[in-house]
Image (cartoon, grey):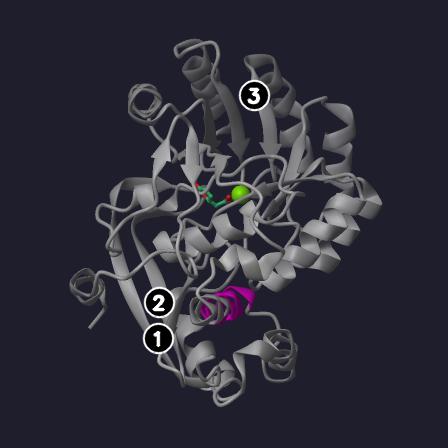
Amino acid sequence: MSDLRIASIDTRVLDVPLFRPHGFATYTATSQPILLVSVTLEGGVTGYGEGVVPGGPWWGGESADTMKVIVDKHLTPATLGREVTELSGIVADWERSVANMRFAKAALEIALHDAWARALDVPLAHLLGGQFRSELDCVWALGVLPLEEAIAEVNERQEMMGTRAFKLKMGSGDPKVDTGRIADLIANTDVDLSYRIDINARWDRLTSLTWLPKLADAGIQLFEQPTPADDLDTLREITSRIGVPVMADESVCSPADALAVAKKQAADVIAIKTTKLGGLIESKKTAAIAEAAGLACHGATSLEGPFGTAASLHFAASTPAVTYGTELFGPLLLKETYVTEDIVYRDGKVIVPEGPGTGLEPDWDKVNFFTRD
Ligand code: MUC
Ligand code: MG
């Protein structure tokens, strides 16, 4: 077997334009900054991970810039020279030098997993318990958009890639106007489509209790994180009062958070982002807690590029607890890709790439083109 010691870790920030602006509750992204981490083993194999937040630090406080500093200055010295087969110990040791900073840890942890899987010549899912499915349902997320543009985008995605389920971003505007816009969208598109909303923790209790029932009447089938991350009492109240399933996203950034949500019965579904959770090992722990508590898991996204998305797909494909589909559509938001063969989307599903590691290879001309000076 080739030498599995970690020889070098390289980081670079890519700025990849989006095909259209993506409006979140407090920020509109026109490009996605991505920290691309490359880990090379002594035997010569290289693996890739991505450090990504949705657009910028508004979501969880980290950005591609902060991740670069954390990986370069603090995680890399604690990692170089060790055997990649010690990965769970390496990740545990990172806690001695870096608290929190889970997005940064995920970028390196996933690159290490990928290098290890490539060195063994197996798909990444084989290191995560084994792959038992090859495709997953995939939601398309619309940013905050005017009604006509939203209707056009839903129709287009339905036609182009068979998408049947859509996530709508809310929380940026007047709740009454926004609720009306969403009710009009649902009324003016195919009746069989499924819609969910993500408020990114921007509404308070009273706003939620006023407008969520109206959104339920309009046909919304899932409420994602309406209220602030730490307020599990209000999340539980919404979960028990309105009769539409609730998904916890910002409220669950660690396995301990999942345990707190489970104990309070504060949500029905947990959004598993391998980024916010600090990588694949912590994501597995989080999914196990949710499963034991009878909660569903959703394969969620920070709008990663192809490498990050593929890693999350291998996670979802090897984790039976992911029973609530995925929204792993991030690469499709990018104007152009930077891998030689991109992830395939068809019939409302995303296909898990085949081959060693994530199954994807960098297109170095494109990677260099998108690399920040
Ligand atoms: C989030 O909070 O879920 C995922 C899709 C999208 O549009 O935003 C992200 C972040
Ligand atoms: Mg969310």
The residue stretch that appears in magenta: 102-112
Q: Residue at x 84, y 47 (%)?
A: 263
Alpha carbons under labels 3 and 2: distance apart: 36 Å
Q: Name the residue under label 2.
A: 36
Magenta span dominant secondary structure: helix
The vertical placement of 354 against 256, above or below, is above
Q: Which of marks 3 and 2 is nearer the N terminus?
A: 2
Question: Residue 229 placed where, x, y %?
Answer: 65, 49
Give the residue type at disc 2.
Answer: Leu
Which mark, residue 11? 1
Q: Are marks 2 and 1 in contact (CB under 8 Å)?
A: yes
Q: Mark 3 points at which residue?
A: 220
Alpha carbons under labels 1 and 3: distance apart: 41 Å
**Mark 2 C-beta closer than 8 Å to ligand 1:** no
Give the residue type at disc 3.
Answer: Ile
Q: In which quarter of the image is residue 32?
A: bottom left
Q: Which residue is drawn at 75% across and 51% down?
A: 289
Q: Which of marks 3 and 2 is in front?
A: 2
Q: What element does badge 1 sit on?
A: strand
